[in-house]
Image (tube, rainbow, N blue to C red):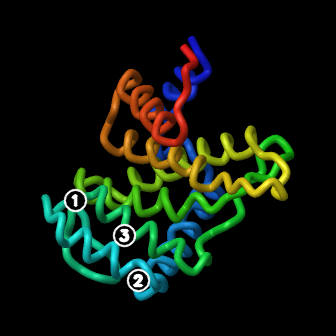
Amino acid sequence: MTIAQELIRNVIRTEFSDFDSRTLDYAKIRIMDTIGSMIGGINSSGVDMMLDLVRTWGGREESTLMGIGGKFPAANTVLVLGIAARSNDLEPGGGPEIEGKKSPGHYSATTVPTAFATAEKMGLSGKELITALVLGDDVASRIGVAGAGPWDIGWDPAGTCSRFGAAIVAGKLMGLNEEQMLNALGIAFMQISGSMLQ
């Protein structure tokens, strides 16, 4: 079994009841902070342009645009809310400490909108949303810690790591099996930069 397969098996098998109260409290704080950031960023520069574009695209009414109203395809909802959450740079920034290393963070601006939009689309509960969010943020944080380098070289890992976190969040909420989840992570990887590794 590869490391990726082991990670995916853990994600698929983990349930809400597996988390301790501290983990759940921390997740709820990140959710509240991110919702505040999304609502606070709704009127920021650029969000209105993306909202106009999303309205033009149309599509299925799957997920609600918090702070704006109306339903749009889940992916488009995530796009608008993610931009709003990050626009003032006020979303949760610090990630958890993993094996003595601090994760860079700023993943919640991507993972929280993904969790809300996907859970609403799938008709799932708050417990299922939080479970997927904790797992996605954990994966993003671990990748962030593994790849952390000196900040002075100008690389911000939030965009890279949060892509994997969002894939885990959406995949867990959509009930993907191991092969499908591996494919979802592979697609996320290829969209970030790509690889010729076999």
Taking depth in this image into account, of 52 and 108 the one nearest to the observer is: 52
Residue occupied by mark 3? 80
- Residue 92 sits in quarter: bottom right
| Viewer-proximal residue among 116 and 44 | 44
Could you say which disc has been placed on residue 42 in the image? 2
Mark toward the start of the polypeptide (3 vs 2): 2
Query: Above or below — where is 45 with respect to 14?
Result: below
Q: Nearer the viewer, residue 169 or 124?
A: 169
The residue identified by callout 1 is 73
What x and y, as percent, mark residue 156? 68, 56
Q: Position of residue 168 (x, y in %)?
A: 46, 41
Q: CA distance from mark 3 to mark 1?
A: 11 Å
Position of 150 relative to 175 (above/below)? below
Query: At x 40% / y 70%, what residue is drawn?
Result: 81
Element under disc 1: loop
Is there CB contact under 8 Å for labels 3 and 1? no
Tell me which label, 3 or 1, sits earlier in the chain. 1
In the image, taking residue 68 as reference, residue 21 lies left or right, namely right
Image quadrant in which the C terminus is located: top right
**Label 3 SS:** helix
Which amino acid is tagged 1? Pro
Count residues near mark 3 (Cα–Cα under 10 Å), then give few for <14, some for 14-19, many for 20+.
Answer: many
Mark 1 crowdedness (10 Å alpha carbons): few <14, some 14-19, many ≥20: many
Q: Position of residue 165 (x, y in %)?
A: 52, 46
Q: Position of residue 135 (x, y in %)?
A: 53, 44
Q: Is residue 148 left or right of residue 108?
A: right
Mark 2 vs mark 1: which is more N-terminal? 2
Circles 3 and 2: CB atoms closer than 8 Å:
no
Q: Residue at x 41, y 63 (%)?
A: 113
